[in-house]
Image (cartoon, rainbow, N blue to C red):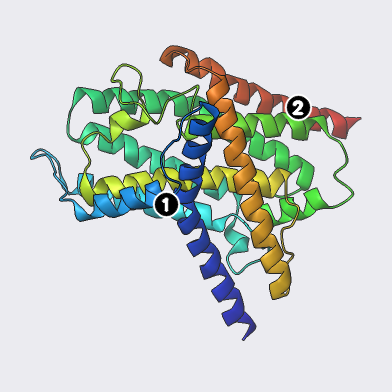
Amino acid sequence: MATLESLAIQIVEMLVVLAVAPLLTGFVRKVKARLLGKRGPPLLQPYRDMVKLTKKEAVVAESASWLFRAIPYLVFAATWVAASLIPTFGAGLMFSWSADMIAITALLGSARFFLALAGMEVGTSFGGIGASREMMFATLAEPAMLMIVFSLALVAGSTQLSTVAAFMLSPAVGVRVSLGLAMVGLVIVAIAENARIPVDNPATHLELTMVHEAMVLEYSGRHLAMIELSAQLKLVLYVSMIACIFVPFGLAPPGAIPRALLIGAAAYFVKLAGAGALLALFETSVAKMRVFRAPDFIGVALMLGLLATLLRFVSREM
């Protein structure tokens, strides 16, 4: 019975992550519009867009292979699995043993590889430009992510998110400069990986500046719906990871009663709303930078992760 309950809670968490992904995107768009003095699209517009795309016919180029058709589903599967592994409202769930930050980074790297491959599959110039820019950013974003993971592992003694969250809630964490550096670095990586301002603008289709949109220009219909949902899941993934590591308050402990899980779910939605509002405020306060300056921005995350790791080593020796 306990196994069935744990499996049911895990399935509920997977469905919650999938369900709130379009809602978070719609919330960010709504808050940005309000901050700019506009009415903005409806909060549930991303759901309507998904339904509209799934009803449309998928137009595929004649030169596209079977891989071009399969990539949207591969990207969606990898992103959904990675997002579902992160503890959102409860820790110690059935698959929490696999919620390892290195494994999540590997899943995101696989999704990025397939998406870049899709950009080059048809042979268009825009797809190739977007894929090359994505790989250029990845050469800094992935090492930065790994350095941040190593710095957190040195502090918490594990790369498993449930263990890291439990350590962050314990009195042993204290005030550490390395954790502050890791948090800022992870936020920068999240902005870059989700193609948000100032690295990229998800609301534009200007060929000279777009990165993510250039890789998916040839997709339509249900294929485009899968790509869009994967991007929305990726945003939820990074928000959930930052909340789990640095703001784990309200997270239900392993074997918690239903009331604690409900409190954890309520706290999770509050964290999503707060992160969405902060993201909208940040994007309305800064301008998009030039494409060739983006590596400098992402390089800051790499340096912060390296400094956090070095500080941890120095503190251990002292």
Quarter location, residue 146 = top right
For the residue pair 256 and 23, the one nearer the viewer reads as: 23
Which of the two labelled residues, at mark 2 and mark 1, occupies the earlier sequence position?
1
Residue 196, percent across and down? 48, 29
In this view, 229 is above or below 132 = below
Q: Residue at x 73, y 52 (%)?
A: 165
Q: Residue at x 48, y 63 (%)?
A: 15
Residue 203, percent across and down? 38, 30
Residue 240, percent across and down? 60, 48
For the residue pair 274 and 5, the one nearer the viewer reads as: 274
Of all residues, the one furthest to the right in this rendering is: 318
Residue 310 shows which numbered tag?
A: 2
In this view, 108 is above or below 184 = below
| Amino acid at the residue labelled 1 | Ala
Q: Residue at x 50, y 21 (%)?
A: 198
Residue 312, percent across and down? 80, 32
Of all residues, the one furthest to the bottom in this rendering is: 1
For the residue pair 195 and 106, the one nearer the viewer reads as: 195
Q: Can you identify the residue that label 1 sits on? A: 78
Of all residues, the one furthest to the left in this rendering is: 62
In this view, 1 is above or below 19 = below
In this figure, what is the number of numbered marks? 2
Give the position of the N terminus as an image quadrant. bottom right
Q: Secondary structure at mark 2?
A: helix
Q: Residues within 10 Å of mark 2 (few under 14, many from 20)?
A: some
How far is mark 2 from mark 1, CA to CA? 32 Å
Q: Residue at x 20, y 36 (%)?
A: 218
Q: Residues within 10 Å of mark 1 (few under 14, many from 20)?
A: many
Side of 302 relative to 21 (left or right): right
For the residue pair 35 and 267, the one nearer the viewer reads as: 35
Give the position of the C terminus as an image quadrant. top right
